Structure formats: C-alpha cells, structure tokens
C-alpha cells in the first residue's frame, strides 16, 4: 500500500489507514533527497587549516573545497555547547537555553542548558521524515545533572532524534583513554594506545560501519550522519609520527605565522587584498620577547596541534572514501565545519601540559615543560598550546574562543559539497555572504525538500531563526540574506547589522576566575565598518558616536528577543553548581552509598567533596589468599590530571589526592590488611577559610588509626571534564602511579563504599579566589 502525500509539517507523520491488511510502505523523504553528513572539528580557528590559508595540512578539507564551496564569512557562537545547540536546532543559542556550556548552566532561561521541546533538532526532523540518523563523537548538549545512568534520557542523542550514538557526553575527552557511551550504555574501548588506539579513529570506524549497514539494508533510504570529533579540542593527543611531520616548521613563531597566513588567504581569495591583520591581544608577548627555552616549548606545542589537526582530517578522508566506494558521495550534502569556535586561548600565556591547572588560574612551568618535549601528545600530557598560537590560528582576526565580540572567537572556516548541485565554474570557489551556524539546519531542509515542522511530538514549534544558504550556490554575488546577528559569550558582546559591527570585549579567555572583571556598564564599545574593514582592524567608535549608539540599541533589541539577559560573565566559577545557581541533582544530600561495579558518575552526579570535610567508608573483605597483599581501587574520582583515589597498595590502605595533575599527595597506612572483614575509612578534615585549601587526612581500620598525613593543596572548582567516579576500579587514566591504567580493580570483595560530607561546601569570595591563585604561583 502506497503512502498518500503528507504535508510533513506535523511530526511524527501519522500512518495511513490500513486496508485489508495490506502492508504500508516505509516512510521515505521526498524523491531525490540527499544523504546528509555534518562533520565538526572542535576548537579550530579560521586561519588554522590549509584550505583557509593556515599551516595545518588538511587535504580532505581541500578536496571538498575544490569540489564544493568555501565560506569566508561563516560564524559560530564562540563556545562549544552553544554552537552545537544552535547547529542542530537552527535557533540562536540563548533561544535554546545554551548561553554557555552545559557545565556553566544557571537558572536563567537563556542559560539553563535545556533545549525546549519547541525547538526540534535536525535529527528529529529528518528522522521524522524517513531518514536513518546517527551521531558519533562529542555531544556536550545534555544538562550535566542528566548525564547519569538514571537519566532522564530524552536530552541524550538517542532522545533527540538519533537512532544511533557512539561517543562522549562532555566538553572534551582523553583520546588515548576515553570513557564513552554506546546509546546510553557506558563502554570502554577494548583496544589501548599501546595497541594503536586513538579516539578519532575509533569514532570514524563506527561511523563508517553504520553507513555501510544502512547502505546494505536500505539503499533507497537516505541517512543523516553527525560526526563531531573531540579533536582539535584539548587534550592535544596524537602519535609522534604526525608531530614529526611539522618539526621545525613553527620555529619562526606566531608573529611570522600570522603574516604568512594572511598572505595565503589573500591569494586564495578569502579576504580582500587590502585586508590587515587585526590588532594583537594585549598582554600576550610577541615571539621575540620569549627566551630560547620558551620558544622551544611553544614551537613543540604548535607542532603537536598541527599533527593533531592533520590526523583528524585523515579520518574524514576515510569517511569520504567510503562514501565514494559505496556510490553515495555525489548524493550526499556534506557540511565540513572547521571549528565550533575560534582557536582556544585557554592554555594561558605559556601553554600547559595540565589543562585544569590553567583552568584554575595557575600558570604551568615553562622549565618543567621544556624537560618533557618528547612526551608532547602522549598519554602523560593533557595539553593546550599558548595563547600566541591561538591568536595565530585565528588570523587575520582578533582574539580567541569565548570572545564573541571579535571574529577571532566567532568566524570559522566552513565547506559545503553537494555533488551535481555545485559544479562547473562554481566548484572550488569562495562565497563571501555573511552567515551563521543557525543557517545550517534551514540549508539542510531546503536541500532535502522538507518544510519546517509546525508541530513535533505534539509540541508547537518556535520559528527556526536561521536562513538557508542554498541561494549562494548559483550566485557568488547574491546579496546577503542575513543582515543582522547578535553575539554574546561570557559577557563579551557584539552586534552585526547591515555591514556594521559594534562590539565590546568584557573578559580575557585565559583568565577564567572572577577577579578584576569590570562592571558591564563600564565596558568600552568599539565600532567597525566591516564592508571596508574586513578584519576589525580600525575602531571608528570615537569618530562615529551616533552610529555606535544606534548599533548598541540594536544589540539590546536582539538580546532581549533571544533571552540574552541577564548577562553572566562567570566562567570557571559556573563549573560548580553550588556557585552557578543551577539545579543540583544531589542538593540536600550529605551521604551517598555505592556498590561494587557502580561507576561513570560525573562530578554533577556524585557527592561534591571539594572545599569541605568528608569521609570515605569502605566495607570490604580481604580473602585469605590476599592477606597482607590485597591491592586495587576501592573508589576513585578523576584521573591523572586531577582527582583522588582510595585504594590498597601492597596490602596497605592508601589515599592519593592529585591537584590539577601537578601537586600530588599520598597518605599510606602503616600496617597491611589481614584476611577477613574490614570497615576502612579515610577522614578528610578540610582546613577551611577559602577555596582550594589543604586538609588533614586520617586513615582508619575500624576505630584504629592506621595512617595520617596532609594534602597541602586541593581542587577549588572541578576535577575533570572527561573522567568520572567509579567503584572498585579507576577507569580512564589513573589518579596515581601506584597502579596501572588497566587491571587496577580491587582484588578483595567490596560490600559498599559510602561518601559522607560533614559540612557545607565553601563558596568563596573574589578575595578567596585571588588567595587561591596566589598560593599556587
């Protein structure tokens, strides 16, 4: 029985009435609707990739650009979760509750981290029209309190329209030792780095296998594949052979690199011949101001990043080759987004091998890093390059990720390829129309012949706020169809309107603690005529005050319309729900009991032990065969780059605290554990008086004290974005070198492990934060 024509504006589309038991044909999209593949690279600036004039060789991106279109004025939101939420809904990020990352959510509507049901995702729309749908890689859109095995799961990928998901839920992931989900089930890859494992390769393997399966089972049914790499976000993890390809190429430094990139961009027609480099960021040293040691460290950081970027593009090549082998390449609309924000300056002035160190306001040691040049990219590091390279990777624009006011934070390379739809003289050319990430969804809808739904799952839909880009395919000179766009992130603000742009930078990305930020009303606004000043190089605010006021009024109108107010300039502070003011899953609880085998608890789904006294109690049995030699983890949170672990080492109860992967403290019991039942306890008596202070540690076996010691420095805000709390094992990377990354499970029996918090967490004032930073410098 053939389906009657549907309007497709109400999803799900009702099944037709069955007559005499005749089977109903499967729902399919309109005839000729293409497959859709969206690939997202993380934390890559406009001037990083070779197709956009940068030093990172990306031949697959170049191939797709040569066979499709490059967009030179494509914009994102300046941060990851907001860009992804906007990409998949076609709405501005505040409209769909994502004014910051999921971990930075507050109670305000534009920042609460919850996508409203009135804003259906691309996957829900395409799936509701007969597409097969799958997502692989980074998600980072589910509210942090819902990333647990208790759900709810309606805001997980499989609850937002994707039939298949394989990837990770948070901001970043260790590429050597990832903790992943298949659907909503936690999984750990069987292969390890010593066997050749790498996360980007694993994600691509799963995407290819899924596409092969769809093509074999339902070759007449189009598919939608969303492949969002963890690369090139920190940690910069890649094998030495990729780094070695770039040895010596960055010894000239970031100032020279910016000049070289701009020259190439002019030759490629990406910027006008009279374009100038945007001003250098205040407080960032020029290359010649570095000493030889700092230059060597900085150059290795950039070699590592470039190798990481090229390796990622090589995985995209495998996917494209498979589409071609299957005969599906020319029937596939490919969106290759080279960045979800500008290049990241979150590594600080020096760069860091310990990301969370800088995230807490503490610079890494250049001399220490200089002793580890051969380890860059490996599993002992969790690196981000220095700010200078981030600025160079955003060339020719100013500033970096988080800075929504300037194009260095918001302008990224984007490539569209669609077989016979972009051919002849159009293929390989550049489009200069001003567009935004919210325009991807309406472009997909027009390409697939599908309307915006008016109702999805019984919920009336809000209007899609983006506009299709298909009009640019046939006419390079077509007038812009997006003439107004607001920008806001972490208090940094901008408004684009009819070629003009008014902007104000409120904060500095590598200074993520609430120390010294101005009041919003004291921010200084700049004005640029981008029709003649492509790179925001010449501030006209003093010359045209009336025009500036006009643009500022437009910003207020747009910001009010899209739920931008109230502004919130906190960054690291919002990582902690106590400070952020959002719903806390465990609010009001002072105890939580775990059983052996339980795990994958994120920081927002387990007890918050930071900045407060607490105890860990473990009821265990030591087998006769393990008397005085029992080993392995009882409970652990975090990993090599920040966390704590209670475990047994050569028969002795031991507690290790790892602060930012840099400061490590171990307290060990003075006796070994005999066979039989034990109630083991670690008592953590916090010093108090602010954030990140020390603590006195007491280890007990029953009522007997078996060990005492100190932790002099503790974690103020968060342990890790990618590692979790686990019982009976330490998954991912190990908190301590006392045990291996694998086979570290407890060799006895665990009845239960309990966390009891003994006091309210310290919230801290700005003065406390300043003291915390000073204490670590």
Image (spheres, grey):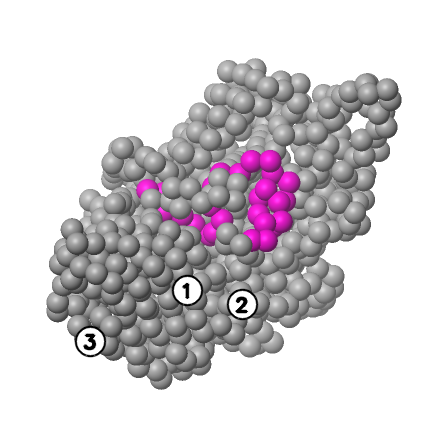
Q: Secondary structure at mark 3?
A: strand
Q: Is residue 90 left or right of residue 324?
A: right
Please name the residue shown 17% across and 67% down the image: 668
Instruction: Characterize the local packing of mark 3: few (<14), some (14-19) or many (20 or more) Cα atoms within 10 angstroms.
Output: few
The segment highlighted magenta reads 151-176
Q: Determine whether, in the image, residue 507 is placed left or right of residue 744.
A: right
188 w.r.t. 665: above or below: above
Q: Which residue is mark 1?
A: 593
Residue 517 in the image, given as x and y percentages of width and height: 49, 74
Question: Does residue 570 appear in this view?
Answer: no
Image quadrant where one finds the N terminus: top right
Quick one: label 1 or label 3, which is nearer the N terminus? 1
Q: Which mark is residue 704?
A: 3
- Judging by the rendered image, the residue that carries numbered circle 2 is 584
C-beta proximity under 8 Å, tags 2 and 3: no
Q: Nearer the viewer, residue 499 or 599?
A: 599
Question: What secondary structure is marked by label 2?
Answer: loop
């Amino acid at each position: 029985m053939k389906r009657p024509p549907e309007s497709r504006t109400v999803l799900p589309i009702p099944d037709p009435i069955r007559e005499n038991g005749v089977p109903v044909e499967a729902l399919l999209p309109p005839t000729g609707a293409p497959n859709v593949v969206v690939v997202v690279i993380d934390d890559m600036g406009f001037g990083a990739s070779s197709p956009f004039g940068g030093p990172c060789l990306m031949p697959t991106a170049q191939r797709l650009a040569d066979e499709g279109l490059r967009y030179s004025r494509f914009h994102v939101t300046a941060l990851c979760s907001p860009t992804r939420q906007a990409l998949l809904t076609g709405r501005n990020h505040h409209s769909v509750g994502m004014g910051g990352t999921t971990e930075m959510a507050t109670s305000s509507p534009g920042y609460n981290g919850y996508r409203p049901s009135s804003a259906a995702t691309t996957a829900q729309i395409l799936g509701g029209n007969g597409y097969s749908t799958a997502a692989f890689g980074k998600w980072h859109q589910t509210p942090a309190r819902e990333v647990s095995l208790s759900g709810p799961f309606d805001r997980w990928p499989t609850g937002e329209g994707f039939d298949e998901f394989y990837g990770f839920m948070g901001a970043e992931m260790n590429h050597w030792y990832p903790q992943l989900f298949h659907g909503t089930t936690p999984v750990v890859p069987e292969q390890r780095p010593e066997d050749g494992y790498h996360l980007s390769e694993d994600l691509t393997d799963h995407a290819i296998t899924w596409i092969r399966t769809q093509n074999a089972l339902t070759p007449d049914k189009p598919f939608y594949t969303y492949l969002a790499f963890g690369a090139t976000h920190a940690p910069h993890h890649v094998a030495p052979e990729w780094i070695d390809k770039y040895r010596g190429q960055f010894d000239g430094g970031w100032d020279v690199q910016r000049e070289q990139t701009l020259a190439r961009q002019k030759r490629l027609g990406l910027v006008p011949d009279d374009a100038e480099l945007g001003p250098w960021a205040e407080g960032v040293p020029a290359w010649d101001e570095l000493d030889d040691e700092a230059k060597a460290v900085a150059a290795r950081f950039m070699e590592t990043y470039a190798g990481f970027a090229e390796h990622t593009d090589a995985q995209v090549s495998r996917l494209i080759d498979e589409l071609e082998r299957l005969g599906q390449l020319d029937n596939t609309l490919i969106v290759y987004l080279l960045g979800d924000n500008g290049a990241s300056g979150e590594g600080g002035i020096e760069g860091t091998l310990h990301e969370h160190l800088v995230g807490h306001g503490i610079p890494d040691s250049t001399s220490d890093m200089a002793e580890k040049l051969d380890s860059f990219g490996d599993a002992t590091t969790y690196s981000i390059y220095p700010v200078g390279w981030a600025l160079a990777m955003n060339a020719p624009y100013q500033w970096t990720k988080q800075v929504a006011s300037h194009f260095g934070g918001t302008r990224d390379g984007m490539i569209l390829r669609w077989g016979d739809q972009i051919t002849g003289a159009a293929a390989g050319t550049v489009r200069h129309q001003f567009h935004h990430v919210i325009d991807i969804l309406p472009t997909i809808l027009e390409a697939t012949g599908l309307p915006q739904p008016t109702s999805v799952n019984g919920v009336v839909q809000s209007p899609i706020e983006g506009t299709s880009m298909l009009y640019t395919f046939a006419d390079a000179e077509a007038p812009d169809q997006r003439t107004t766009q607001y920008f806001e992130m972490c208090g940094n603000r901008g408004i684009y309107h009819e070629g003009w742009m008014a902007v104000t930078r409120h904060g500095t990305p590598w200074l993520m603690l609430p120390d010294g930020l101005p009041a919003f009303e004291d921010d200084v606004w700049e004005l640029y005529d981008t029709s003649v000043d492509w790179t925001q190089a010449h501030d006209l605010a003093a010359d045209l005050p009336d025009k500036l006021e006009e643009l500022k009024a437009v910003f207020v109108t747009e910001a009010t319309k899209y739920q931008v107010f109230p502004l919130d300039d906190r960054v690291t502070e919002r990582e902690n729900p106590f400070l952020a003011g959002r719903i806390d899953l465990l609010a009001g609880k002072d105890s939580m009991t775990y059983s052996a085998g339980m795990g994958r608890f994120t920081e927002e789904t387990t007890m918050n032990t930071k900045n407060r006294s607490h105890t860990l109690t473990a009821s265990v049995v030591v087998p006769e065969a393990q008397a005085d030699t029992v080993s392995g983890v009882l409970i652990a949170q975090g990993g090599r780059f920040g966390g704590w672990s209670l475990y047994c080492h050569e028969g002795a109860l031991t507690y290790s605290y790892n602060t930012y992967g840099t400061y490590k403290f171990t307290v060990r019991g003075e006796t070994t554990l005999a066979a039989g039942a034990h109630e083991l306890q670690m008592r953590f008596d916090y010093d108090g008086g602010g954030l990140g202070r020390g603590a006195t540690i007491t280890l007990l076996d029953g009522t007997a004290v078996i060990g005492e010691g100190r932790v002099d420095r503790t974690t103020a805000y968060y342990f890790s974005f990618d590692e979790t709390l686990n019982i009976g094992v330490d998954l991912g990377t190990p908190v301590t070198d006392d045990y291996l990354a694998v086979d570290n499970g407890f060799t006895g029996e665990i009845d239960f492990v309990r966390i009891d918090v003994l006091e309210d967490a310290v919230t801290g004032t700005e003065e406390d934060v300043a003291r915390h930073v000073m204490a670590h410098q």
